[in-house]
Image (tube, rainbow, N blue to C red):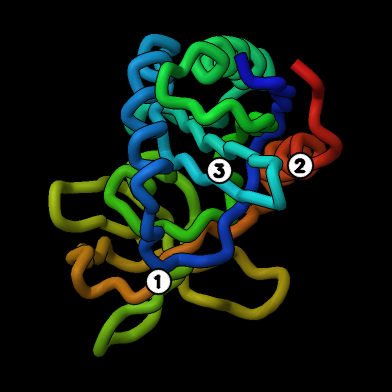
Amino acid sequence: MSDSEATTSTDRSESNSTATIHNPEESRLKALLEPAVLASRLYLEDVSIHVAGSHRTVHVVVDLPQEETGGVSLDAIAEVSRGLSDILDNDPKDDGRPYDLEVSSPGVGRPLTEPRHWHRARGRMVRVKVIQGENLLGRISSVGENDVTLIPEHEVKKGMKPKQGDPITIPFDRIRQGKVEIEFSHLHEAALEDEHNGPSEEA
């Protein structure tokens, strides 16, 4: 059995919006751990391995299903961490090196790079950089198979109520970058995410 220490943290924002290239071991662990994550009614976003000498850190990112809103609770993170730790401890293909397990959920600042990310951000204000088009600030009203519909908000003078435009539908293949904007009405949520980004809890 590996000498493992499971740690939990939540809501880490990923600053890199490019596709992640997985090595074979990360892909193997993702396939190994995914059934347990799904059994916890969560979605396995990513598995990465960081090696320092003879020590490994296995970082697992989980999220809610795309049809749900809100964030993953600390209790859910702790529960799934225990299950994943047991699976890794009993992995027949493990090489026996000690490891730390870190389980987290994406933060509100995560770049919107996949359709499911846009589903998860329904109702939120987003800033979108469009390929060969005008960049937009607007609220997500609906998400289709190949596109997203926004209600644009036009900037006005300070102190005035933002002016909404007509709905605009943008194909995903025309979006260069999308990111959720923090709003005053969501400051409490953002504060919780910052709090969850603090020291990890030992499971």
Q: Amino acid at mark 1?
A: Gln
Residue at the spot 58% in from the left edge and 39% down from the top edge: 59
Query: Distance between the Cα atoms at labels 2 and 1?
Result: 24 Å
Query: Distance between the Cα atoms at labels 3 and 1?
Result: 17 Å
- Position of residue 145 relative to residue 64, above or below, is below
Q: Is residue 32 left or right of residue 186?
A: left
Residue at the spot 26% in from the left edge and 56% down from the top edge: 149
Quadrant of the rendering where the C terminus is positioned: top right
User: Residue 116 at what x, y percent from top left?
Assistant: 31, 43
- Position of residue 187 relative to residue 90, above or below, is below
Mark earlier in primary sequence (2, 1): 1
Taking depth in this image into account, of 157 and 51 the one nearest to the observer is 51
User: Residue 93 at what x, y percent from top left?
Assistant: 41, 25
Name the element at disc 2: loop
Q: Are marks 2 and 1 in contact (CB under 8 Å)?
A: no
Name the element at disc 1: strand
Q: Amino acid at mark 2?
A: Asn
Q: Are marks 3 and 2 in contact (CB under 8 Å)?
A: no
* Residue designated by label 3: 106
Q: Amino acid at mark 3?
A: Pro
Q: Is residue 145 left or right of residue 125?
A: left
Between tags 2 and 1, which lies in front? 2
- Position of residue 121 relative to residue 128, above or below, is above
* Residue designated by label 2: 197
Name the element at disc 3: loop
